[in-house]
Image: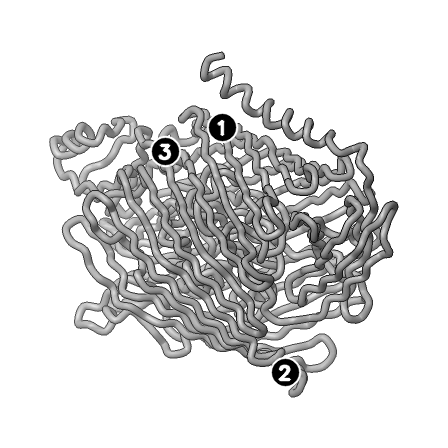
Amino acid sequence: MNRTEKTSAMPRRVLALLLVAATTGLAQDRAALEGRVLDATGMPIPDAAVFVRDLGTGLETGQPVDSRGEFVVDVRPGSYRVTAAVNDFETASATVHVRDGSSEPVVLTLAPAILTQSIVVTGSREEELREATVAQVALISRTELRDSGYENVSDILSEEPGVVTRASRSPGSRAGTQIHGVDSRQSLILIDGFPVVGARGVKSGILNMNRQSTNRLDRVEIVKGASSALFGSDAIGGVINMITREPRERFDANVTASTGTLGAVDLRADAGFVHDRWSGFFGAERHKRNPYDLTPQEFDTTGPGFRRYDYMAKLNRDFSENLKLSLLANAFDNREVSVYAGSGGAQATTTNDSAQNYGLTLNAGLLSQTQMQARAYYGKYDESSAVDIYATSATVDATANLNERLYRFDTSLSHVLGSRQLLQGGLDWFSNEYRGFNRLLGDNRGQAIRMADAWFQDRIQAHPRLSLTVGGRLTNHSSYGTRMVPRVGLLFRAAASFRVRASYGQGFRAPDLGQLYYRFLTPSGLYQIIGNPNLSPESSTTTQLGFDSTLGRLRFSATYFRNGIKNLIQTELLGRPRTPEQLSRILTQFSVDSAFSPALNRLFYLYRNIENVYTTGIEGKVQLRLTANLIVSTGYTYLDARDRATGQFLSQRHKHHGNFRVWWSTDRLGGLRTNFRGTYLGKWPIVGRRSTLIADSYQLWDWYLAKPWGSGFEIYGAVDNLFDSIDSNLEGPSPSYFRADPGRTLRIGMRWTFGAE
């Protein structure tokens, strides 16, 4: 059999292995372990998850409860530790002894808590307790999302150790996210496990996290390090998975309104229901900001004004204990206006962009220990922009458009093999299409790529204290052929409250359509960005070693990480060709296709590969619960990120990154809640064509206060950038800036929650 035949046979072998495994153990004695998960009032919690750990072998598996908070798990006779978990509640556990037939139903009651971080999903593509995951996973809970007062995901990400968002405080600007020094181009962004559309490779190459609303989310999970073996291309630096909210009551609704500095107006309304085997959640939002200007002596706006609408619908149906169907739909529509100076004089750009995402998920229990999931997804992103040059008589002097369509289908199986293994695997199919005038080579004829993947993972409980995870993914790319990436991890429970983790993974990322075919000539005439069909795929390796521990009220963790990336894709400034001869030399030297039609007298940016870079460092976090309602936490990340060939520190990275938080609530004063949060970012280099500038370190401190006021009603207020930190270069004789923070901003708002239990 030749190599091609072996490659094409791989997906069939993965499915055959899973199906054979699924048929084992059918004749063995089984028993039913069943129960319910309730809150302190005795009402079911329909979005909880239950984890069952075999005390004999240490193998732990998880599953969600149904819409009535009930669960049934098929197990062998033996002793088990059953744990129920959901965000914003303390976990609850019980030891159950299962004999032939079944056990007595177990009832787990969860008490409310603040800042609990109970379960993760994205670490292994299956729900598991955070303490049991091999990967390094951070979680931002619903409480943190709500009581930060932030409207966009980009802002809350900036407070997570090891994660840096650039331009997150600039209304209307694009916010990218670095994970351990690996840029946002190399991080996969998901919503409920589905990819987010937003035209990667275009607009600085990133997905704009300022377009992702916090209100619809239950939590945000961040997997740090190469995760291509589980999640495919784009995940060489990590994964950010935004998990949407699930209803918990028969009917509940919320109306929120706030206003603040920069003409901010934010209006939100949502409602959820649980009825028999149906549940659903629906939301609509409107957000508005005015433009602001840090350099009033120049004719431009630092942050453009915008208005945005967000919509979401989520519907779930439990047909039986073994068959569940869910539908997710969300969308946004955004309009922003910016003013700046171009070669033709003062001008304004009006940009309209919108996205729609639809996902359908089917979960089915095929056999007692075998689960199947099938998902289908469609996403679309559309952008149009118009430039108005004030010095000319025409109303609109230049227009451009961009359209993206993304299709995905995947199916997977998970099977408990014997008493010591959890085997997972599946097939993925992916299609991405771009087209757009003045945005892509070929304009509206468009470009497309396809990928077909097979993946597997085996979690082996070698000892009750030791679990080993091995896995891999085979990717077939329509332009770059076939690649294989492995993953291996180890979790050692040294004690009940002390765990050691080690992992190694590889990543593969083919250039996206924007990086291959981007063709953008600014109407201002100042610069041009050209794609590069000759790019090589990026590849990465991630090594992590860390531990975490809980000692009473103290929780702490530390992780060493090292990411090596080959053929990192970046934009590079090649110069400003002023004559046809200069332009011809650039085209020849860098093998640029003349079909891109680059222009004269513009800065020439080209996507290129950097041969070999690395990011390495240490991340630590400490959380202390001083009382049941008072929590103090701090985190720190040291980062060394360099180009191996030159030894130069990578641009736009911070060597030092720290944060500090105090969260407090009280049953007195009507249930007052408040927190004080700070982020420190050390000096950072900005690499230019001729020299490297060093931007100053800075700190950002935020304060939030919420006060209930009657049944279901509360008021809240927030001060962001409390000490009015702005770029120090704005204070010089020729004001300029490297960071676009607008200074201190204020917000005040109200929430009204009502419903029926």
**At 31% across and 51% down in the image, what residue appears?**
389
- Which x, y percent locates residue 29? 82, 39
Q: Earlier in the sequence, mark 1 or mark 2?
A: 1
Say what amino acid the circle numbered 2 marks. Answer: Thr
Amino acid on which the number 1 mark rests in the picture: Arg
**Distance of mark 3 from mark 1, alpha carbons?**
15 Å
Contact flag, marks 3 and 2 (Cβ < 8 Å) = no
- Mark number displayed over residue 450: 1
Which percent across, then down, holds residue 28? 80, 36
**Residue at left offset 38%, top offset 44%:** 205
Q: Earlier in the sequence, mark 3 or mark 2?
A: 3
The label nearer to you, 1 versus 2, is 2
Q: Amino acid at mark 3?
A: Pro
Pointer 1 and pointer 2: residues touching (CB < 8 Å)? no
Residue 407 visible in the snapshot: yes
Q: Residue at x 64, y 33 (%)?
A: 411
User: Along the line of sight, which residue is nearer the eye, 452 or 130?
Assistant: 130
